[in-house]
Image (cartoon, coloured by chain):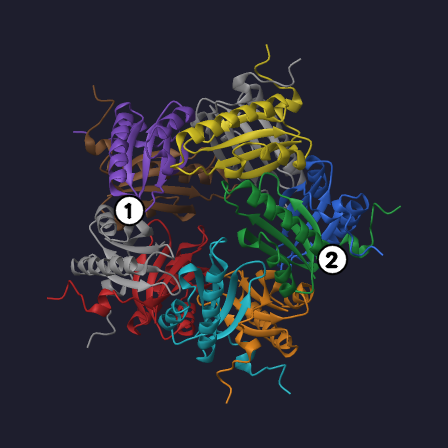
Chain colours: A green, B blue, C orange, D cyan, E red, G brown, H purple, J yellow
């Protein structure tokens, strides 16, 4: 099952730089682990904000919660999840892939 | 450049069925044309609503508007677009593809 | 997987009574079919509104959409779904049942 | 009388871990006491947030307030309650129980 | 149990006057019946709107729904109910009645 | 003239208990003075929140402001006032009092 | 007592011009009557909308409602009223009048 | 050109009293200077809040910003401005002045 | 003085095409007249909506209202205006023009 | 591609003046660098707020994010971006320039 996830990160502006660099690095690592596990599929930056949109593929909402709450920045995150149902006209379901050779 | 697009379709509940079937069919066709052109990448149903989320890849907002306003149901659509910037941790950019053999 | 579903029914106030009675009866039947199938678990009236809260247990959002769009009043419905993750302290999971003999 | 209750917990991200563990444990205990008393019936996690939906069965709003304000995390909680009226098509009222043998 | 109820009446501006006068008269009657039954306690006009605030005393949300849906204008009404818990400092509970001789 | 008043109290969760008890006691006293003066007529607790609804009878908005800003917790209060006009069907105006002997 | 009043007029775009001209003329007349009576003090156009802000001086909310509901366009109006309390620094109260000779 | 201005003052509840008294006094002085300059025309208190509505007459938005940002409490202010266009039925424009002898 | 203006056009989806073409043409003409008069400076399409952002330079809000209400589509328009003050760092004010030879 | 950008700066009211002056100066410099690079085209002050509207011309949302996150005040900024599509009636596209000699 797929979810679209919107995350705002409410990080105090004058927190020490090293603290931010350290946690940010661990955040990248954990994100890549979730990607390798096939849960985190795509990740985009919301222009102008410390916020992102991401596409998750998980068994259900419980597995989604496990994934999201495993992120080091989770305690500073304001997260909205959008459950997605399959659409009959989804290019992926129809096998339409313009990049295909 | 990619956009996430949220579309609500405000179709009058007691409009004649054939009218709906006819326009819905043309909508599917046009959607598949946009997919084949590489603009419409993914399409999901919002559970419980005649609404959907979609991922577009286009040159810019002008090309996005051309694509969206070409949809037969466009006059009944309430559309919000979310411009997306690239994220350093995007699995696609990092080449992390769990489905890869 | 469980969902909480909030439904507002936007029925034209001066629609003919029989039309309302006929469709309302089919709505009850379909609701009971969904209950018998184990999908619709609980249903409550929002006091003062032609609206309700319901608890669904389904495989995923796609099955939820099938269930909701099968309701006769679906075209007049404004539906919000809330995906639910399991909670470690859920009385049902902990087997706490005050009604148990 | 039943209520659906939505609770957001606004816990400071950098509060000491032990403080969180200690109060969280007392929270679980008090939740189980309310469940044993037949007031707290179901409890679900909102995926991605330190928030939950719960179903309460109480005499009235005054008893609901007593129950909610007895929770250790109450001072950090932002709570919305939804009063529920009985619905003629509620599976529980109609005795429709798909799990029944 | 008491509820504060906010009602907006969405009456089409150019509906025939007699229709309005007729239904408005039945509305007053039914309101007075609910008052005599001790359910409708107070009723105020929201200045500038065809809307009102009212105070109800009922057994629970189900009885509240019965009362509200018995109003002739119910199909044109947009209703929000606010469940009320008792407050230790409520003048009525403390027997403070400045009008008392 | 009557006003419905909605008050949210934004009290820091980890403020010292005695400070809260002391100011809460002064709050009750001042509330009872306003009741005795015939200004504060009714007071209800919003279930689940440190918030309340109250009914005030005052000369005008200036006197209402004097009353509200005299409350010890005023600096921590977020207050919305709703001006009320008389309604022709108000049970109190019609002398309908179901409790009357 | 003074009120700031915000009015949006929801007039059907394709209603016949004469109907609009006729009712608009009666609206102006009634507005001037309310001004002569000292109730309507100032009136401003919201740029870009068929909407306006106005300043009323009335005995209370009941008299305000009488005034507003006397306007011919009242059935097409969406009105928000803001009750105003006196401010110690109000130029009018302090007698500061820069236009004074 | 006239503007209606809504100002909320977000002053920390437990800031020292003298600090508040000192800045509040300077605020009154600056307000009276703006009134004497003919910019600040009227000022009302929002009942129940440390907030106010005011009427400004200035050359344009730039002069309005100079005036507002000159207020000592400006850094604690949350300000919304409403640009006002002249209305053909404005009592001031029509010379209707009920107070005139 | 400059204003940013956001316009949504609420045109009935199934209105006859010629009616739309006719009024749309007059809209373009009037827009070009406002541009030639130096009032309408820039105009952008909101992607996915029959809506636009525009930059106006006018004497004040009254002249802005005259301009906007002169547009043929005005009765179908939902308009929000944003008054703009000069900014010390505005490239135009600083004479920074990257296109300059 | 053009974007309209709305920025609110959430600067703590009682931060030391020199800190503010220092960062504000660096903010002006960086703004002028973005203007010289042809990215920042126009900048306006929102009257009454430490907020601004700006017009950016960039390759895409990724370049927009680079520009915005390069601003010294970025960590204190709450930014909304509006993607803009070209409009057939844009005075700049039509070469209508009332200032032209």
Residue sitting at x 46%, y 80%: D36
Q: Nearer the viewer, residue B32 or G87?
A: G87
Identify the subunit bearing mark 1.
H
* Residue lying furthest bottom: C101
Residue sitting at x 71%, y 39%: B1
Which x, y percent locates residue J18?
Answer: 42, 28
Label ID, residue D4: none
Q: Is residue C16 left or right of residue A32?
A: left
The N terminus of chain J - image quarter: top right
Q: Dot 1 lies on which element? A: loop
Which x, y percent locates residue H24?
Answer: 26, 36
Location of residue A18 (image quadrant): top right
Establish if C88 lies above or below G51. Answer: below
* Residue lying furthest top: J101
The residue indicated by pointer 1 is H47
Establish if D100 lies above or below B25. Answer: below
Q: Dot 2 lies on which element? A: loop
Identify the subunit bearing mark 2.
A
The residue indicated by pointer 2 is A38
């Amino acid at each position: 099952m797929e979810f679209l996830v919107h995350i705002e990160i409410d990080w105090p502006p004058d927190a020490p730089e090293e603290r931010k660099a350290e946690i940010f690095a661990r955040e990248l690592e954990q994100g890549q682990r979730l990607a390798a596990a096939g849960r985190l599929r795509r990740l985009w930056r919301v222009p102008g904000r410390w916020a992102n949109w991401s596409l998750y593929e998980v068994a259900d909402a419980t597995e989604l919660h496990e994934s999201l709450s495993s992120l080091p920045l989770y305690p500073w995150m304001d997260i909205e999840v959008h459950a997605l149902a399959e659409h009959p006209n989804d290019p992926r379901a129809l096998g339409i892939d313009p990049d295909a050779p």
